[in-house]
Image (cartoon, helix red, strand yellow):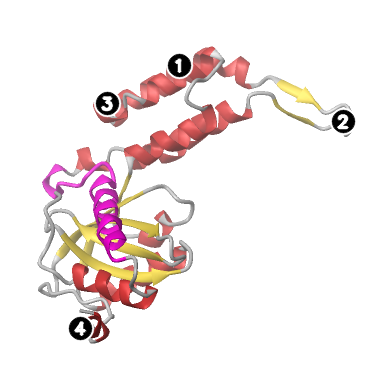
């Protein structure tokens, strides 16, 4: 088996007709053996379309993937992203869907699992309605929330040592700001139903989990051979997750 892995061609191979219109779920995952993979998956085709081994998740690697696919004649109609700063700008010209799961995670990081203040509690409850709302509905909810808590959000505290002031409830402000910044990208999937755009990156996250489980069975392989095994899996005909 190991000798066969050594013969694997490690460049990304996409066996689709040039000119194919793609809806991509894009993300990066890391392994215990330090390196990671940036992967573009087409959920409608259940295919890995492009991948690259990386040491860190950067805007440049996403730009490279887009460039290589477009050079090969593919049209990227839409992408589903996790909201990492700057990545969205790499896909100008394509529709962008912000992953609902990651948006919830961003808000949770700011507010924690159990916010102590009522404003945080209400905002956390609001974000739970993401999958069941529309852009119009969420906009109204956020507008109403902000109107109710605007004076609270303006409260400031002064550092007695430096004399500088800062907002007292900056984490709640940051959670709200993340929702407002991402709002134009949270419901792309509803605006273009004909493209069947997922509203999360969950299908790729699940793919990563199964891939890591398979690799754990072959812990004795060198990192190079593990990567070649991944390439063989990616070059397969597909997978079962939609």
Residue 105 position in % (x across, y down): 42, 36
Q: Which residue is mark 4?
A: 4
Q: Is residue 38 above or below residue 182?
A: below
215 magenta-colored: yes
Residue 13 position in % (x across, y down): 21, 77
Closest to the camera, between mark 1 and mark 2, is 1
Disc 3/disc 1 C-alpha distance (Å): 16 Å
Do tag 3 and tag 1 residues touch (Cβ < 8 Å)?
no
* Residue most extreme to the right: 161
Main SS, magenta residues: helix
Find numbered disc 3 in the image and state the secondary structure of the residue it sits on: loop
Front in this rendered view, residue 5 or 119: 5
Query: Is disc 1 surrounded by few (<14), some (14 to 19) or many (20+) residues within 10 Å?
Result: few
Front in this rendered view, residue 6 or 116: 6
Q: Which residue is mark 3?
A: 133
Query: Is disc 3 surrounded by few (<14), some (14 to 19) or many (20+) residues within 10 Å?
Result: some
| Circle nearer the N terminus (4, 2) | 4
Disc 1/disc 4 C-alpha distance (Å): 57 Å
- Residue 72 figure quarter: bottom left
Disc 2/disc 3 C-alpha distance (Å): 43 Å
| Circle nearer the N terminus (1, 4) | 4
Whether residue 146 sits left or right of residue 98 in the image: it is right
**Residue stretch in magenta:** 193-218
Find numbered disc 2 in the image and state the secondary structure of the residue it sits on: loop
């Amino acid at each position: 088996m190991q000798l066969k892995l050594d013969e694997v061609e490690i460049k990304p191979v996409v066996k689709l007709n040039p000119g194919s219109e793609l809806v991509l779920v894009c993300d990066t995952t890391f392994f215990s053996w330090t390196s990671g993979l940036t992967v573009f998956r087409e959920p409608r085709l259940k295919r890995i379309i492009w991948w690259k081994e990386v040491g860190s998740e950067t805007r440049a690697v996403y730009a490279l993937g887009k460039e290589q696919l477009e050079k090969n004649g593919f049209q990227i109609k839409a992408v589903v992203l996790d909201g990492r700063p700057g990545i969205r700008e790499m896909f100008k010209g394509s529709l962008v869907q912000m992953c609902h799961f990651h948006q919830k995670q961003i808000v949770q990081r700011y507010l924690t699992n159990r916010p102590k203040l009522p404003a945080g509690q209400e905002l956390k409850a609001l974000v739970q309605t993401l999958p069941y709302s529309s852009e119009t509905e969420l906009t109204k909810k956020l507008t109403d929330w902000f109107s109710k808590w605007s004076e609270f959000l303006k409260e400031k505290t002064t550092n007695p040592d430096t004399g500088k002031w800062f907002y007292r409830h900056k984490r709640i402000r940051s959670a709200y700001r993340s929702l407002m910044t991402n709002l134009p990208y949270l419901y792309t999937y509803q605006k273009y139903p004909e493209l069947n755009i997922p509203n999360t990156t969950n299908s790729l996250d699940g793919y990563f989990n199964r891939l890591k489980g398979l690799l754990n069975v072959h812990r004795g392989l060198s990192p190079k051979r593990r990567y070649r095994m991944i390439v063989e899996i990616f070059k397969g005909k597909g997978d079962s997750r939609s």
